[in-house]
Amino acid sequence: MFDWFSALAAGSALPAGAASELHERGFVVSPGPMPDRIEQLAEAYDAAVASATGDDVRIGSASTRVNDFVNRGAEFDELYIFPPLLAACCRVIGRPFKLSSLHARTLRPHVPAGDLHVDVRRDSADWPLLGFILMVDEFRPDNGATRFVPGSHRWPGTPEDRMSDVRAEHAGEVLACGRAGSLLVFNGSAWHEHSANTSSGPRRSIQGAFIPRDGRAGTDFAARMPPETRARLTPLARYMLAL
Ligand SMILES: O=C(O)CCC(=O)C(=O)O
């Protein structure tokens, strides 16, 4: 099989400044894969969310998640093979990796901040994890931009271990803001969660995670894949989906 990891790791798709921010702070916001097509993407997002049914839709207290944006239209294909994102995976995961999840998350208006957490514990087969969030809407201080504690990806403990109230504002937290179409990339060990959405509008996003290749993916993309998705996938996409 072609050695995708070595090929991606040898490239320079992630600018040096973004790489060092990811390394030092545990997250970075950069331009996403489709900056001039974000309105079409937002329309495709709304249509995909509206047509999802059953267990694929999870309505939580602050947000609605819709599972599997690999199989909901070609409009989303570019995201999980975006070269700077894969270059970030090479740095954070450091060995061959695959896509574990890709879902929509719409944060509702007038909701409080969520609980600070890490996405994966260090003793898990899915560690290290690289998370990413495509901002379908602008992420602002008033609409629930993701909050991060910079540098926390190097700390041994989790928010649950170290904080008495994980929903409270952490003294060191900062907001990851960006215009619509921006891509937030983060180390899954960084403490994070959405901040309060005090605005009157939803905050839409497409979120995903990459994990080591021998980890257990959150979504079994292959098992769910209709022939039309399979037919359009590039060799790199097939590799990232472990097909
Ligand atoms: O929606 C957000 O702002 C945060 C997402 C999150 O907590 C996660 O990816 O685990």
Image (spheres, rainbow, N blue to C red):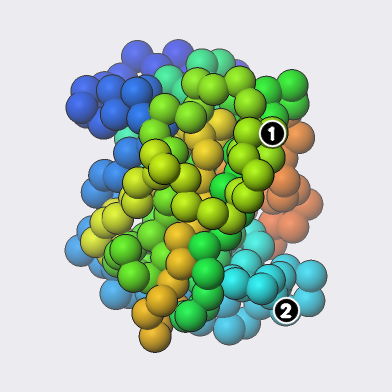
Callout 2, which amino acid? Thr
Image quadrant in which you'd find residue 172: top left
Name the element at disc 2.
loop
Which sits in the foreground, 216 or 123?
A: 123
Identified at 63% across, 50% down, the residue is: 165
Q: Which mark is residue 191?
A: none
**Residue placed under numbered mark 2 in the picture:** 53
**Residue 53, image x and y in percent?**
72, 79
On screen, 132 above or below 65? above
Q: Which residue is mark 1?
A: 161
Depicted 203 relative to depicted 6: above or below: below
How packed mark 1 is, by other alpha carbons closer than 10 Å (few <14, some 14-19, many 20 or more), is: few
Proximity of marks 2 and 1: CB atoms separated by less than 8 Å: no
Q: Secondary structure at mark 1?
A: helix
Q: Residue at x 32, y 63 (%)?
A: 141
Q: Visible in this render: residue 105?
A: yes
Residue 235 percent across, percent down from the top left: 51, 36
* Observer-nearest of 117 and 170: 170
